[in-house]
Image (cartoon, grey):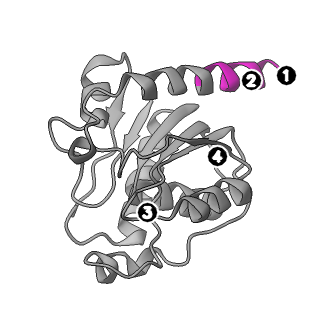
Amino acid sequence: MLIVPGLYNSGPDHWQTHWERELPNAERVDQQDWERPLLGDWTISLAEAVRQRPGAILVAHSLGCALVAHFAQVTGGRGVGGAMLVAPADVNREGPAGRLLVGFSPIPRQRLPFPSLVVASRNDPYVEIDRAEAFARGWGADFVDLGRAGHINVDSGHGPWTKGRTLLKGLIAQVTATRRL
């Protein structure tokens, strides 16, 4: 499993960090610059991590979801077993981080070549729920609406996020079944 954080990385109390510590074989994809993301650099880091862990499930948050979509477009998704895409940031949306995200725009909308799940919230300040659902449709991903869960991070009360672990188990079962076909 590869943990794919978004802008500014995921801090010590973020659910991604909990999962990295607690789940066997979970490893974070490190980026050279978490403060000023460059799509090319971030894609290279993800590609190298996938090369070292073929068949890995990607667990992405926020800008990390856009990175996974771009990675799949550039590489055809080679080496990825599946992806859980949580609170995908709308990089076209104006806001305080808008200038930093422009290099990730537009987000590719073609079908992802691996099983995937998008998890979104009705009051996420970085993406409207309808837009997140449209991403899921374009990517051919299953979609889960968590209701009013904010950006699904520490600020919205999602530390270890046990519900997310349950969703991840479902995705892992789907990936395992797909591999058997």
Quadrant of the rendering where the N terminus is positioned:
top left
Q: Residue furthest front?
A: 148
- The reply to whether dot 2 and dot 4 touch (C-beta < 8 Å) is no
Q: Position of residue 43 (x, y in %)?
A: 44, 61
Which residue is disc 4 drawn over? 78
Task: Identify which amino acid the numbered label 1 is placed on.
Answer: Leu
**Callout 1: SS:** loop
Mark 1 burial class by Cα count in 10 Å: few <14, some 14-19, many 20+: few
Mark 2 burial class by Cα count in 10 Å: few <14, some 14-19, many 20+: few
**Callout 3: SS:** loop
Task: Identify which amino acid the numbered label 3 is placed on.
Answer: Ala
What distance separates the C-alpha of mark 1 from that of mark 3?
33 Å
The stretch in magenta equals 172-181
In the rendered view, does 4 fall on the left or right side of 100? right
Query: Which numbered disc, 1 or 4, marks the residue that appears first in the sequence?
Result: 4
In the rendered view, does 10 fall on the left or right side of 125? left
Above or below residue 126? Residue 55 is above
Query: Which numbered disc, 1 or 3, marks the residue that appears first in the sequence?
Result: 3
**Callout 4: SS:** loop
What distance separates the C-alpha of mark 4 from that of mark 3?
23 Å
Which residue is disc 2 drawn over? 179
Q: Position of residue 163 (x, y in %)?
A: 44, 25
Task: Identify which amino acid the numbered label 2 is placed on.
Answer: Arg
- The reply to whether dot 1 and dot 2 touch (C-beta < 8 Å) is yes
Q: Nearer the viewer, mark 1 or mark 3?
A: 3
Question: Which residue is at 72% across, 63% downward?
Answer: 110
Q: Position of residue 175 (x, y in %)?
A: 67, 26
Question: Which residue is at 22% across, 61% downward?
Answer: 34
Above or below residue 155? Residue 3 is above
Task: Identify which amino acid the numbered label 4 is placed on.
Answer: Arg
What distance separates the C-alpha of mark 2 from that of mark 4?
14 Å
